[in-house]
Image: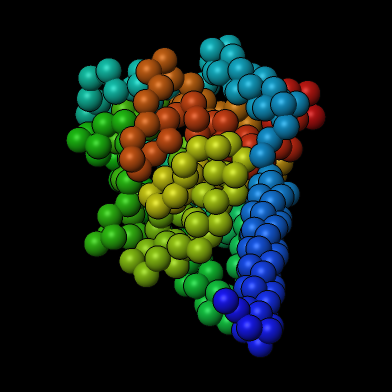
Amino acid sequence: MLTGRHRAIFRLIVNASLTFIICITLLSSSVSSLAQKKRSGGGAHRSHTRATLSPEAREMIEQASAVICQERINDPSGSVPIDEMQGRPSLPVKSPEALAGAERAQRLLPIAKNLVVVSLRQLASKYRLRNSRASETRIRRAIDHVEAVSNIRADMGSRDNASVFMKNPHTIVFGTIFLAGLRSEEGIVSVLAHELVHVADGGEDSLRLLFRAVGSRASQLTGMKIYGQRAEELTCDLVGTLATRSYVSTSPSYESLPRRISRALEHNCVEVDEGDDDHLSPRSTIRALLALNPGLSRELVYGH
């Protein structure tokens, strides 16, 4: 039998136990509520910062892509799609088509170099990559690489490709089929600019931060995975379109604006649309570039 003293002690123990249980329950509820708020807040933050394309923007991109490939069909100077180039026999370096293409590329090289330098500076500012001395040094080094390029060389074995070898970074090598397939000045400027960006990056990865920024932005807009070498290739193509657009502005012509700027991308109007680990597919490349440059889409669709 419990004495009065024992009953008092028992009541104290019971009350303390109940108080402890209530505190634990309230604490657990608070932690759970806080965790839910954090998850909810985090999700809202990601949703707010993710800049995806609107349905209207996607429709504009599809219309602009269609304009590019329709212009290619109607344009006597339209570029040959790269999948069609791949099926053609190799051309000798001394063939008339290869000689004409190489002469055109050599003549346009100084112009393309200047346009690439301007485009790189614009992109570095747009993506806020010029806010430190180290960043400015990398951009300056990249520009120095571009300015050192001086030669175009036709190569039968390179077929439908253009490339730069770091052991000889002063020369851009064009496959003879590629030279023959790029029938316009705009098409040549676009590819020259692409290769010059590879030169600009050099062995020091001078443009690594720019590649990463462009790839991240394009990934957000399109939902495609664009990083590593894919980001580099897309940035090279982006500079190619910017350089070509600037070239069109500085070299007046009676030809329509959509026709001339389409030539920068027409070689991507393929039937067999395949990419790989290092490249988006050609048609996906067109869409990604238009997503990054909505003004170009409007010019293609509306003609001004």
- Place of residue 93 in the rendered image (x, y in percent of width and height, measured from the top left): 25, 33
Q: Residue furthest left?
A: 157
- Place of residue 1 in the rendered image (x, y in percent of width and height, measured from the top left): 57, 76
Viewer-proximal residue among 14 and 25: 14
Residue 236 visible in the picture? no
**Relative height, residue 155 to residue 14 (above, below):** above
- Place of residue 203 in the rendered image (x, y in percent of width and height, measured from the top left): 33, 66
Q: Residue at coordinates 64% horizontally, 73% vertically from top-left?
A: 14
Viewer-proximal residue among 182 and 142: 142
Q: Residue at coordinates 29% horizontally, 40% vertically from top-left?
A: 154
**Relative height, residue 271 to residue 205 (above, below):** above
Q: Residue furthest top?
A: 74
Q: Residue at coordinates 22% horizontally, 29% vertically from top-left?
A: 92
Say whether residue 87 is left or right of residue 52: left
Say whether residue 54 is left or right of residue 77: right
Say whether residue 295 is left or right of residue 220: right
Among the 4 quarters of the image, the one containing residue 80: top left
Q: Residue at coordinates 53% horizontally, 69% vertically from top-left?
A: 139
